[in-house]
Image: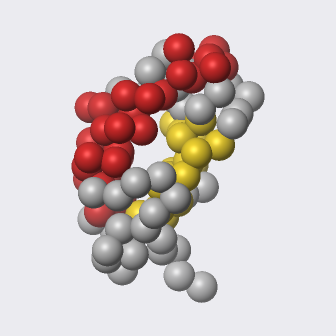
Amino acid sequence: MSQFPIVIAVCTSMSCVKSGAETIMLHLQQQLGIGLNETTADGRFRLEEIKCFDACSAAPTARIGEAYYRQLTPEKLDQLLDKFRRLPM
């Protein structure tokens, strides 16, 4: 079974939105060149939203693959995307 596409699910609950989830989502869309519920042309990433990870105190949050990431910033996302882009397909 392939590990691709790597699903990036951004929490869009009220707590995450108040903490910057919209900025995170827009940054991902720009960096990946895709919209919500789309997969990159190379099949590496898919961008989705989820309503709650139950981690409101650490907002904004996202799941990338099987791991959860908290208190995300565009800079942290760039580092994570670089890491996942280096994975062999």
Q: Residue at x 36, y 80 (%)?
A: 89
Pinpoint residue 75: horizontal percent, then vertical percent. Answer: 26, 31
Residue 24 in which image quadrant: top left
Number of marks in the rendered image? 0
Q: Quadrant of the N terminus?
A: bottom right
Q: Residue at x 58, y 45 (%)?
A: 49
48 or 65, which lies in front?
48
Pinpoint residue 32: horizontal percent, then vertical percent. Answer: 30, 55
Answer left or right for 41 relative to 6.
Answer: left
Q: Residue at x 70, y 33 (%)?
A: 52
Q: Residue furthest front?
A: 35
Is 12 rendered above or below residue 28?
above
44 or 49, which lies in front?
49
Pinpoint residue 12: horizontal percent, then vertical percent. Answer: 59, 32
Report if residue 79 is visible in the image.
Answer: no
Q: Residue furthest bottom?
A: 1
Q: Please say which color scheme the image uses.
A: secondary structure
Report if residue 3 is visible in the image.
Answer: yes
52 or 22, which lies in front?
22
Is 31 rendered above or below residue 57?
below
Answer left or right for 72 relative to 83.
Answer: right
Q: Residue at x 40, y 54 (%)?
A: 35
